[in-house]
Image (spheres, rainbow, N blue to C red):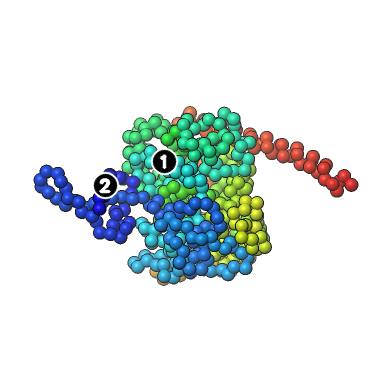
Amino acid sequence: MTFRVSPSILGKRRIADVYNAVPVVIPNLSPPPLSIVPLVARKYASVAEHKPTQNNGPPPGYISIKGNNHSESNVDRGSRPSPAPAPSCSAPKNPNLSSPSSTKLDSRSLDAADWDQNPDLSISKFSELPQKNFGVNQHMIINEEFKEALRQVLWKFKAPIRYAFAYGSGVFTQKGDLSAASSSASTLHPNPPEAITKVQKGPQKMIDFIFGVSYSQHWHSLNLQEHRDHYSPVGSLGSYAVSKLQDSFGAGVYFNPYVTVNGTLIKYGVVNLDTLCRDLSQWDSLYLAGRLHKPVKILRDNPSVRLANQVNLISAVRTALLLLPPEFTEEQLYSTIAGISYMGDPRMSLPAEDPKKVLNIVQGQLPNFRRLYAPLIENLPNISFNDSVCAHEDWFDDPHVNAKLAQDMDPVKRGNMVRRLPKKFREKLYFEYQAKFQIPRGEFNKMLEDTKDDETSTGFRRQQGGWFEQRIAKDTEGIQTEVRQVIEKTIRWPSIVQTFKGIVTAGFGRSWRYAIEKREKHRASEVRKREEAVQKPSGNDADPKKVQ
């Protein structure tokens, strides 16, 4: 067997780690002395990405998520199980998202039932995830040629990218896209691949990426050598200054906007993997976690990020339930989730963003939101689909279906939900209620210490809400206000700092261009709003009841 060995810095795992094989030795034919050199081939984590061909039925692994059936094909092999039955209001709830047999052998093992409370983010293999098909709901199905064109962008970077996703209106359609875009944007990309031109029908849009990297300074050092033109004058200060600016201010992301790669205009943000996983699992800034609340196209996957993002998604559902009434629709649920990242965002209070942005995102991507969250909804004990439309086989992919849901308002269950919110976010909510309930400082500090003891317990106990969490859950009128305030406080300062940092990292010219385009979107939204207001009275005049 002949191996073709090519140098790579895009991964860290050896071939033995990937294929469970012993290293292959190749004799060194160079002049003496002769030596034996182990083959250290590299591979991407993206080998585990699900590779479906079309969007039929619920996400792969749906059956195995709802029960303990592991006979489905493994997503790591790129195959797709047969479409499973769509969720129904009568489907039994199973709180475990994986089989009891799917555990790790060491002392830091992930308890299959407690993956959201005790995530081991140090894992390096997809086989260490709680179950075979764990997290495949995160992989959206898009046009294959378009996906390949997006991946070709990544290949233009020699610096190692461990995790990457594309997001935004340049990848996923939003309601009102065509009317909102300016005609001058129709030739935005200098020389794009044909697949991008076909998918972005009409006016073209810049494509946004996030790159997760292991070592920020090393990555920028390599990227500055290859793509110095991507950086503003800050790049002249060197990789240390760039990485320091990235990691020390705002949300820990360094953006390079309006750069052309492979004939396509893109914006890419660079983030350290530790920073990304921390925000996804703890919500310390909600800057990147909020972006991943919405459908994105993962182009290069990573097991620890997949685990952290699944924690992020189920936390988003729990937070949304605290903001919603007992009965609501899918559109209300997904709009609440998608709107979390915009609460406290300074752009939403300025004429620099479309006021209907959240609604446009949800209405344009309803099947993708369903694919992302339906498996989690089906396995939470206090929420269920409550609509006869779920009995139809084709409802899951129907963008016109807006199914009804219901949640259990029992204070014990909602108290458990409060207890299982992300750590940083939950602590802020506790402090809000400590002031509201006027709990003495000593008693409150003791309660926090007991909470920490529960979290560090080696027994991996399922975290249950106590008297304090249940009291919070009973505050049905005030909890929505308190949760919103905590979200705004979490987001506001990192977003403000990140906005000003963007002016420095992008440069004045690119920042001004970005602001003008956002202003144009806001203006177009206001025009549509006035047009809709004018059309409504004419529709009422034509009402047959009024004619009679």
Q: Position of residue 372 (x, y in %)?
A: 53, 55
Give the number of the disc on residue 178: none
> Which of the two discs, 2 and 1, labels the residue nearer the N terminus?
2
Q: Position of residue 176 (x, y in %)?
A: 63, 40
- Count residues near mark 1 (Cα–Cα under 10 Å), then give few for <14, some for 14-19, many for 20+: some
Q: Residue at x 34, y 35 (%)?
A: 226
- Count residues near mark 2 (Cα–Cα under 10 Å), then give few for <14, some for 14-19, many for 20+: few
Q: Is residue 4 visible?
A: yes
Circle 1 residue: 152
Give above or below for 104 relative to 143.
below
The amino acid beneath tag 1 is Gln
The amino acid beneath tag 2 is Val
Nearest the viewer among 539 and 397 is 397
Nearest the viewer among 519 and 420 is 519
Give the number of the disc on residue 5: 2
User: Does residue 338 appear left or right of residue 546 in this picture?
Assistant: left
Q: Is residue 487 visible?
A: no
Q: Residue at x 59, y 62 (%)?
A: 87
Q: Position of residue 194 (x, y in %)?
A: 49, 36
